[in-house]
Image (spheres, helix red, strand yellow):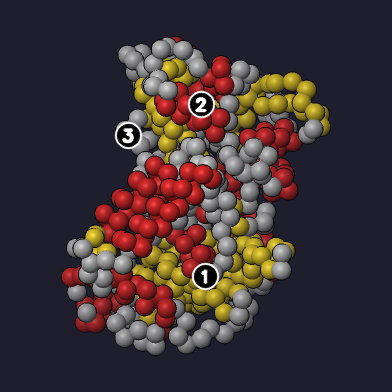
């Protein structure tokens, strides 16, 4: 094995290669001011923001930047720009708080919605691609129902505003490529196809992390005073979801293994209009342009569950209504109007309605943070900021979505809070500051855990283990995720399957097994 790795390491500096924590893997040490895990929208925005402020920054990502899941976002990004109608960030805040089922952190929501116009205008200044229908980089054309309020406690009237800024139906694609292109202007060090394994914690603070190079099998330790986790959600813990296969909750797992708390993991959003059997969804913009839901009897059933908002009700309300209809034996279909056909040319929506069902789409829970991106933990009954550790995007939980995220608030979340990490780090640190000492065997337990899985020789493959656990989550922790269901079947089943299957697992046909 060592000869193969020596050949692959090639021109890497020998002075950085050590064998302190493992004789089977060469260990390469790196030192930087900040290290960012993954290069999606939040990671890229944090990365070039830090380099812009003079910090030596490393970005570790298990796949190339433009393949990150941010690219899949279609609908758009919410911001009260006031360039078409008299919208207001306070109304946007009210909608977000109400949509969160009043579980959202109102300080964090205040910050996000107030910063939204600045963040979107900044994206436009970064040369976000234009659409054929707009002379501006971002086309503001997607209606959003909202409650106009003079005070947050007193609803005055219901209005339909155009608040969602989009680039055709490929907003995530355009945003990610724009941020990627912007990041190339800066001297940022990218480590592509490096899989982050664990945080390096010393004396109650984060001093870097350890990663596996997927190309040559080397172990890399990144010593850093600041680490930003932007690893995305954990949608792949469910059998049916709209998330990419890379959304496996890596950052949440790293935090958990470090003995730190996670927050609101039970708040999983089901997108109401996932295509039945396909695992992909029909974008929210279709409802904004006239599409609506019917059951197998041809009834627009949403009027029975949300008589005012109807098809514009928040996702959790629509998903619950659809699940009730399905349980009562009525299939759900999505039908379109002539107006929608005109707005989305090239798509034949006239033949028949599309069968849809609620599909796992977004995770509101994750690494607990404040609105500055700093990860917080609990000590003596109070929230305490953990030095050196930050999170942004779907991996984090600043509680801006509460129990339910509004459509088009996800891209806003990752841009605003990815952007917030850089000034927060700059307030707390200076470039090239001394990093706390790291023990010589730092990361040894992580390598031992890697070997435990790598050399496992049981009867159950990792694919079988993953599939069974995903189906258990789908069956016992779905739309109606009640305490009784979890206590009586969900948690007990998941726990027993984990104990039964995790130990005798095996890895088949991997690079390591061949060496």
Q: Nearer the viewer, residue 228 or 430?
A: 228
Image quadrant holding the C terminus, namely bottom left
Label 1 to label 2, Cα distance in Å? 39 Å
Q: Earlier in the sequence, mark 1 or mark 3?
A: 1
Q: Position of residue 64 (x, y in %)?
A: 38, 56
Q: For the residue carrying disc 3, how many other residues have a C-alpha within 10 Å: few (<14), some (14-19), or many (20+)?
A: few
Q: Is residue 170 left or right of residue 25?
A: right
Comparing marks 1 and 3, which lies closer to the viewer?
Answer: 1
Q: Position of residue 355 (x, y in %)?
A: 36, 23
Q: Position of residue 384 (x, y in %)?
A: 69, 66
Query: Quadrant location of residue 50?
Result: bottom right
* Mark seen at residue 278: 3
Q: Are marks 1 and 3 in contact (CB under 8 Å)?
A: no
Q: Nearer the viewer, residue 285 or 502?
A: 502
* Mark seen at residue 258: 1
Q: Earlier in the sequence, mark 1 or mark 2?
A: 1
Asked if 376 appears above or below 449 in the picture, the reply is above
- SS of the residue at dot 1? loop
* Mark seen at residue 321: 2
Q: Report the number of numbered marks.
A: 3
Residue sitting at 67 percent across and 34 percent down?
Answer: 98
Comparing marks 1 and 2, which lies closer to the viewer?
Answer: 2
Q: Position of residue 254 (x, y in %)?
A: 48, 65
Query: Quadrant location of residue 5?
Result: bottom left
Q: Nearer the viewer, residue 501 or 131?
A: 501
- SS of the residue at dot 2? helix
Asked if 17 appears above or below 198 in the picture, the reply is below
Asked if 109 appears above or below 436 in the picture, the reply is above
Residue sitting at 74 percent across and 20 percent down?
Answer: 157
Q: Are marks 3 and 2 in contact (CB under 8 Å)?
A: no
Residue sitting at 51 percent across and 30 percent down?
Answer: 320
* Mark seen at residue 30: none
């Amino acid at each position: 094995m060592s000869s193969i790795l020596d050949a692959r390491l090639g021109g890497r500096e020998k002075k950085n290669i050590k064998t302190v924590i493992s004789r089977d893997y060469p260990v390469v040490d790196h030192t930087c001011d900040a290290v960012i895990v993954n290069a999606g929208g939040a990671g890229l925005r944090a990365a070039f923001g830090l380099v812009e402020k003079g910090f030596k920054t490393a970005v570790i990502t298990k796949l190339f930047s433009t393949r990150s899941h941010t690219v899949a976002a279609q609908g758009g990004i919410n911001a009260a720009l006031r360039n078409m109608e008299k919208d207001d960030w306070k109304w946007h805040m009210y909608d977000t708080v109400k949509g969160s089922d009043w579980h959202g952190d109102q300080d964090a929501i205040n910050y996000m919605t107030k910063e939204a116009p600045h963040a979107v205008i900044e994206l436009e200044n970064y040369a976000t691609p234009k659409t054929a229908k707009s002379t501006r980089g971002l086309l503001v054309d997607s209606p959003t129902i909202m409650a106009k309020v003079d005070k947050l406690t007193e609803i005055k009237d219901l209005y339909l505003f155009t608040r969602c800024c989009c680039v055709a139906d490929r907003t995530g694609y355009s945003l990610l490529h724009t941020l990627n292109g912007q990041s190339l202007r800066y001297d940022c060090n990218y480590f592509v196809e490096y899989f982050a394994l664990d945080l390096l914690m010393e004396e109650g603070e984060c001093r870097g992390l350890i990663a596996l190079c997927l190309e040559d099998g080397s172990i890399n330790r990144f010593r850093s005073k600041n680490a930003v986790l932007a690893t995305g959600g954990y949608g792949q813990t469910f059998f049916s979801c709209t998330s990419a296969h890379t959304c496996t909750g890596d950052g949440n797992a790293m935090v958990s293994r470090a003995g730190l708390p996670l927050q609101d993991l039970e708040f999983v959003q089901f997108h109401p209009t996932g295509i039945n059997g396909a695992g992909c969804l029909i974008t929210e913009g279709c409802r904004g342009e006239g599409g609506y839901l019917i059951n197998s009897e041809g009834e627009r059933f949403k009027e029975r569950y949300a008589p005012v908002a109807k098809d514009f009700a928040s996702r959790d309300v629509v998903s619950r209504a659809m699940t009730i209809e399905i349980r009562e034996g009525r299939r759900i279909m999505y039908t379109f109007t002539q107006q929608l056909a005109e707005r989305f040319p090239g798509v034949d929506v006239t033949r028949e309605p599309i069968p849809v069902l609620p599909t796992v789409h977004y995770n509101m829970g994750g690494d607990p943070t404040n609105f500055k991106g700093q990860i917080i933990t609990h000590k003596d009954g109070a929230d305490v900021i953990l030095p050196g550790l930050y999170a942004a995007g779907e991996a984090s939980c600043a509680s801006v979505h509460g129990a339910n995220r509004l459509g088009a608030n996800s891209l806003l979340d990752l841009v605003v809070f990815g952007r917030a990490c850089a000034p927060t780090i700059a307030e707390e640190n200076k470039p090239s500051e001394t990093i706390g000492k790291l023990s010589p065997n730092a990361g040894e337990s992580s390598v031992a855990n890697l070997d435990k899985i790598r050399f496992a020789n049981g009867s159950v493959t990792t694919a079988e283990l993953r599939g069974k656990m995903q189906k258990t989550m789908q069956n016992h922790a779905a739309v109606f995720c009640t305490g009784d269901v979890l206590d009586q079947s969900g948690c007990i089943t998941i726990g027993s399957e984990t104990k039964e299957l995790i130990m005798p697992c095996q890895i088949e046909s991997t690079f390591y097994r061949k060496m």
